[in-house]
Image (cartoon, helix red, strand yellow):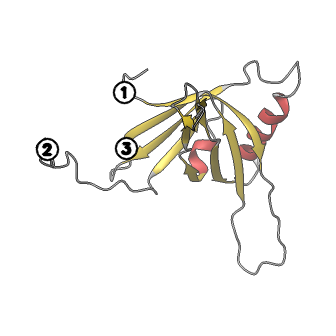
Amino acid sequence: MPKRPLEPPIQTNIMKGYQFKFEIEMFPHVSYHMRDCLLPSTNIDQPMFSTPRRDIIVPGSKLMFDPLTITFLVDDDLQNWKEIYYWLIGSTFKEHKYKDVFSDGTLHILNGDLTPKTSIKFINCHPTMIGDLTFDSGSTEPQSLMGLIMLDYDYYIFTGDDIL
């Protein structure tokens, strides 16, 4: 069988991982203070098909997503940190502050003009962890406080793609 010739890449620009913003529909304040965000890994379960001689791994039918982890700069009045904190606390009670515990979130990857080039929408996010804040009076340099949150979600899609 003859080898196919390599096709030239359609786009030659390299994605820059520092030009992005993340928005949670329920909380507009968080999107302006993001520091980093990890695009979670996606896995598939691998059931075993047992035979007398060998167990064979077969492709599964369920996708598994790692949590969405976000680090953000905390504002002066802790408003963006408190929004996530109250969302987390409120989601644990039957009568919670938020009617909907879930909210979609979108990671916008920006081009050189700081306009969205690609957007990844996380469907039905909800918080599972908010990290601690370190107040340190022994530091000689003023440092910004960083907040860490972890969100679970149903799945994510690249907006504009008609896959699902």
Residue 66 placement, left or right of 9: right
Whether the residues at callouts 2 and 3 have beta carbons within 8 Å, the answer is no
Observer-nearest of 145 and 156: 156
Picture residue at 57% right of the left edge, 50% below the top: 37
Picture residue at 78% right of the left edge, 78% below the top: 139
Observer-nearest of 85 and 47: 47
Q: Nearer the viewer, mark 2 or mark 3?
A: 2
Q: Which residue is denoted by mark 1 in the rendering? A: 161
Q: Position of residue 29 (x, y in %)?
A: 63, 41
Observer-nearest of 132 and 151: 151
SS of the residue at dot 2?
Answer: loop
Q: Residues within 10 Å of mark 1 (few under 14, many from 20)?
A: few
Picture residue at 81% right of the left edge, 28% below the top: 91
Q: Position of residue 153 (x, y in %)?
A: 63, 31
Sequence order check, earlier mark of 2 and 1: 2
Quick one: quadrant of the N terminus?
top left
Q: Position of residue 97 (x, y in %)?
A: 82, 24
Q: Nearer the viewer, mark 2 or mark 1?
A: 2
Residue type at mark 3: give it.
Thr
Sequence order check, earlier mark of 1 and 3: 3
Q: Which residue is denoted by mark 2 in the rendering? A: 4
Q: Residues within 10 Å of mark 3 (few under 14, many from 20)?
A: few
Sequence order check, earlier mark of 2 and 3: 2
Q: Does 3 sit above or below residue 99?
A: below
The alpha-carbon separation of the residues under discs 2 and 3 comes to: 37 Å
Residue 29 placement, left or right of 92: left
Quick one: quadrant of the C terminus?
top left
The alpha-carbon separation of the residues under discs 2 and 1 comes to: 27 Å
Residue type at mark 2: give it.
Arg
Residue type at mark 1: give it.
Asp
